[in-house]
Amino acid sequence: MTTPIAGEGGVDAYAKLAQLGLTLPQVAPPLAAYVPAVQTGNYVYVSGQLPLVEGKLPVTGKVGAEVTEEQAAELARTCALNALAAIESLVGLGRLVKIVKLTGFVASAPGFTGQPAVLNGASNLLGEVLGEQGRHARSAVGVAELPLGAPVEVEVIAEVA
């Protein structure tokens, strides 16, 4: 098992967030019958996180039409920050060992194929905050629609101590 991020040899996620000028948001209440995150064994499964800021979507629409690839990458970054907030609320970032998998969904206009670039926003945020322990396996999936008209949604699986 890898060292927890706040432990010996790991990155202090709280200090790194502060250094980057980021604060963890409040966890958004679920939109339906689920919980934001659940732990089983040494893993935390974070439900799909929308790019909500203070409970609202800053932008809606499809990437490649109403939303640019660059805007969507910033929204994916917000989704990743929201995922970290969900982990924090359940077990605390100090127990985080590694981000194992990130799955991202991009509401895509016909012909849009830049889903990997959009999801780099989320992947890069996790790398900036967690260093090597933020590197993960990933899937980037184009979809027709997302809840509330969101352009992007991200879910995370994390290992915890």
Image (cartoon, rainbow, N blue to C red):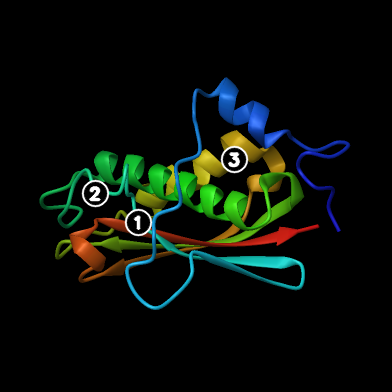
Residue count near mark 3 (Cα–Cα under 10 Å), binned few <14, some 14–19, many ≥20: some
Question: Where is residue 24 shown, x and y percent of the image?
Answer: 50, 39
Residue count near mark 2 (Cα–Cα under 10 Å), binned few <14, some 14–19, many ≥20: some
Residue drawn at (28%, 39%), measured in percent from left and top?
A: 70
What residue does disc 1 label?
A: 50
- Amino acid type at circle 1 is Leu
The numbered mark at residue 57 is: 2
Earlier residue among tags 2 and 3: 2
Is residue 110 shown left or right of residue 54? Answer: left
Please determine whether, in this image, residue 10 is positioned above or below residue 40: above
Q: Are marks 1 and 2 in contact (CB under 8 Å)?
A: yes
Earlier residue among tags 1 and 3: 1
Image quadrant containing the C terminus: bottom right
Q: Nearer the viewer, mark 1 or mark 3?
A: 1
Is residue 13 shown left or right of residue 141? Answer: right
- Amino acid type at circle 3 is Gly
Residue drawn at (48%, 44%), measured in percent from left and top?
A: 81
Is residue 109 shown left or right of residue 14? Answer: left
Q: Along the line of sight, which residue is nearer the eye, 52 or 76?
A: 52
Residue 39 figure quarter: bottom right
The numbered mark at residue 127 is: 3
Image quadrant containing the N terminus: bottom right
Q: Secondary structure at mark 3?
A: helix
